[in-house]
Image (cartoon, rainbow, N blue to C red):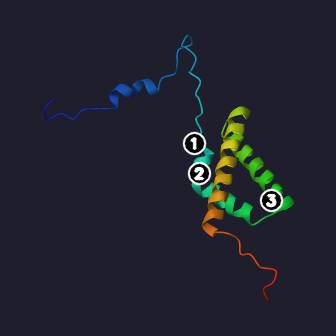
Amino acid sequence: MKGEQMDFFASMDFLATSKPADAAPAMQGRIVAFPVYREVHFVRRTAERMMRREGAARNKFWRTEALRLYGRLQVQGLCHGAIEAQIWGFAAAVDHEMQAISVKAGPLPTTSEGAAS
């Protein structure tokens, strides 16, 4: 072995050959998606955008974001149940972030009825 260089790729000839006809079927893969609720930037950005809207505009924005997310996860190969779980987790994370933003901002300024403007 001393003085010789080992050929690490000589044993990989099997990659170039095709499977025999009686070979076992390939194993099915399982997709494990990164949890959307851990995509911190996406959660924060969505929460900030939600906070800038009120009422019907906020609801429309949320529906649009949820549908976009559904489509993204569907393209990645997730089934309906897994997508639904991801969206619920994302919704909880966005809600939590909105609450955190509200706490950081402090109470809204109040005006007293008798004060001069």
Looking at the figure, which quarter contains the C terminus?
bottom right
Disc 3 crowd rating (10 Å Cα; few below 14, some 14-19, many 20+) is some
Mark 3 and mark 2: Cα distance apart in space: 21 Å
Give the Cα separation between the discs numbered 3 and 1.
26 Å
Viewer-proximal residue, 87 or 31? 87
Residue that label 1 marks: 34
Examine the image and state in which quarter residue 81 appears: top right
Looking at the picture, which amino acid does disc 1 mark? Phe
In the image, is 64 to the left or to the right of 45? right
Can residue 79 be spotted in the picture? no
Above or below for 12 versus 33: above
Question: What mark, if any, has residue 39 been given in the picture?
Answer: 2
Q: Residue at label 3?
A: 58
- Tell me residue 87's x, y (percent): 70, 43
**Sequence order check: which comes first, mark 3 or mark 2?**
2
Residue at x-position 66% and y-position 64%:
102
List x then y, in percent, for residue 53: 78, 64
| Numbered label attached to residue 68 | none
Quarter of the image where one finds residue 48? bottom right
Q: Residue at x 75, y 53 (%)?
A: 65
